[in-house]
Amino acid sequence: MEAKTKDLWVFIETNEDGTAKNVGIEMLTPGKELAGKQGGALVAVVIGCGADAAVKAASEYGADKVIVVDGPEYKEFTVEAFAKALASLAEKYGPATILLGATPDGRELAPVVACRLKTGLASDCTALGVCDDGSIEWTRPAYGGSIMEVLSCPEQRPQIGSIRPGAFKKGEPGEAKAEIIKEEIAAADVIRTQVLEVIKDMGGENVDLEGADIIVSGGRGVGGPEGFEPIRELAEVLGATVGASRAAVDAGWISHAHQVGQTGKIVGPKLYIACGISGAIQHLAGMTSSDVIIAINKDPDAPIFDVADYGIVGNLFEVLPVLTEEIKKARA
Ligand SMILES: Cc1cc2nc3c(=O)[nH]c(=O)nc-3n(C[C@H](O)[C@H](O)[C@H](O)COP(=O)(O)OP(=O)(O)OC[C@H]3O[C@@H](n4cnc5c(N)ncnc54)[C@H](O)[C@@H]3O)c2cc1C
């Protein structure tokens, strides 16, 4: 497909209540910079039903334009309807680039849209840049996270990529100034799946690490499942979420839902406290965008101290109870 513009599109997924999912708002941050470098506009695309809040948020977080497709057939996500809407819009407006979230819905939607538009897809990216020829430079983990792959798509347009939630930080909201463009695309006839029931929790753990402001994480240094107790106690007084390194997860001390890192979740809290975690590159890949990092480790040469803002060299089983007690006192 020919790109008719240099515009960069960000697909904003919506929640049931019409608000925007974090990943869409996060993508507007690199989107603004890349669109600027490429000389195009930053366009948010909202497809949903009653998604006014998402449209407003996209505008407040920097979109120059918001294209909205609103209708009852978009109340629940179906790949048939959403792919029809997004591909039709892309054919009409001809963006140079489209970013989608690498969420369960985004991972289903992105390849179908790419296929309809006869272009490629860089999936599950964690960093973005611009190549010398002006194409987007997509960085993504490959071979189970053992290498980082850098891709570009010099000829085909649009360039499409899905971006991992948490890979970028939300910007600061400002005045909503975007031009709002309403489009009507009927898609009820293409929907082949019918949502009979939505079961929210299948009994698995729902750990919102990506949305957490404070995370207290434990690694192999906690020594066993019971070693997470002082971590949980500190997390409780701080109102924090508990994270973990892969070593602790692989040992079966805590579930995978808590894993931070390249093959876990990418997080960007205001405060990240790493306890008994050495700081392997695959762990750092998931947490170095935290605002403030505190490391507690008994080895003064542990690499985690290279990225920490504050380091405590000591035994976590001595340090954590004191820290928890002092915070309790300060809060009282
Ligand atoms: C393809 C691939 C993907 C991966 N993905 C991930 C990922 O997503 N996330 C991830 O975390 N890892 C990942 N890993 C694993 C990673 O390479 C490391 O093995 C892992 O992060 C190590 O975890 P750790 O720091 O808890 O353990 P270790 O490296 O064993 O470190 C334990 C630390 O605890 C300290 N310690 C021990 N006892 C105490 C104590 N009482 N008090 C204080 N400190 C103490 C030690 O000094 C040491 O620094 C991946 C690896 C591969 C190959």
Image: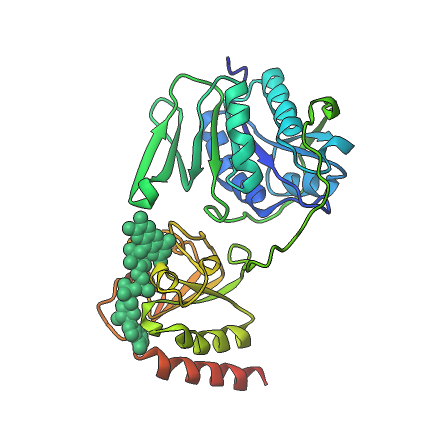
- Is residue 133 something one can see in this rendering? yes
Query: Which quarter of the figure is the C terminus placed in?
Result: bottom right
Horizontally, residue 280 falls left or right of residue 185, namely: left
What's the coloring here?
Answer: rainbow
Q: Is residue 292 left or right of residue 84?
A: left
The answer to whether residue 117 is left or right of residue 12 is: left
Residue 115 x, y percent position in the rendering: 51, 21
Q: Is residue 182 left or right of residue 112?
A: right
Q: Residue furthest top?
A: 2
Q: How many marks?
A: 0
Q: Is residue 184 visible?
A: no
x, y percent for residue 324 = 47, 81
Of residues 42 and 45, the one nearer the viewer is 45
Which of the pair 65/85 is nearer the observer?
Answer: 85
Q: Position of residue 241 (x, y in %)?
A: 52, 65
**Residue 96 picture location, percent across and down:** 50, 22
- Picture quarter containing residue 315? bottom left
For ligand 1, the image quadrant comes to bottom left
**Residue at coordinates 50% horizontally, 65% vertically from top-left?**
214
Give above or below for 127 relative to 219.
above
